[in-house]
Image (cartoon, rainbow, N blue to C red):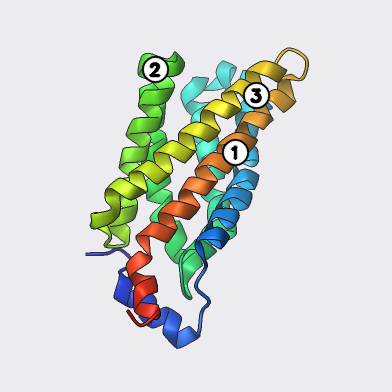
Amino acid sequence: MSWFQLDPQSIADRARAAGSPVPSLGASLVRGMIGFTVVSVAGFVPWAVFGQWFHKQGGEAGMYAACAVVFLALTAPLLHRLIIGPGSMSRFYKVFCPAFAAYSVAWIAGWMMLRGHLGSIAGLLSGTVVMACMLVAAFDALRVVVKVFFALFVLNAIGYFVGGVSEAALIKEYPLYAKLSWGVFYGIGLGAGLGLAFHICQGRARKLLAGG
């Protein structure tokens, strides 16, 4: 059972009636990477620019919550076309907001419990499991949950850890740019993962639209 009429047949019916274009894998990856990189840089601003203030006022939890709010607010306007057919903006918000909120909570919990590289891996792993399960449930695509998980986890992990290397290399001379560079690489990685994940989740809808 899908959420918000995102099952394959509903997607295909809406797209066919509206004559909506069907994004290719390449287009989905590019949209995901470019769009989510913009979102990610903005989402890293509370940490990169206001991190010290948050530590004095609300601690790490408050800072991470502020970052999550930015991600939730800005992602749909830039990535909603990953969903095939009309009405994609509202449906993207309805699907992505709870999925990313759950991902963020799981990631923060893993990080704050273990810290360091182990905490990062635990956070990425637990957050990605939650997000993958919620996305495939939304699209009635449970059979591809493993593919969606690996698409999100591998690409997200690459972007996250490459970003960490970039931040470490620049932090002494350019602290602000160092932190924002982490946002750039994180955005590229998770953005590619989201583009691929949404493409996989709508595989059956694309087959229906192609007459299969």
Cα separation between marks 1 and 3: 17 Å
Residue 25 position (above or below residue 50): below
Q: Position of residue 101 (x, y in %)?
A: 41, 42
Cα separation between marks 2 and 1: 23 Å
Identify which amino acid the numbered label 3 is placed on: Ser
Label placed on residue 43: 1
Quadrant of image for the N terminus: bottom left
**Is residue 66 visible in this depiction of the protein?**
no
Of the pair 115 and 94, the residue shown nearer to us: 115
Q: Position of residue 86 (x, y in %)?
A: 48, 76
Name the residue tied to disc 3. 166
Q: Nearer the viewer, mark 2 or mark 1?
A: 2
Of the pair 55 and 148, the residue shown nearer to us: 148
Name the residue tied to disc 2. 118
**Which element type, helix, strand or loop, lies under badge 2?**
helix
**Which element type, helix, strand or loop, lies under badge 3?**
helix
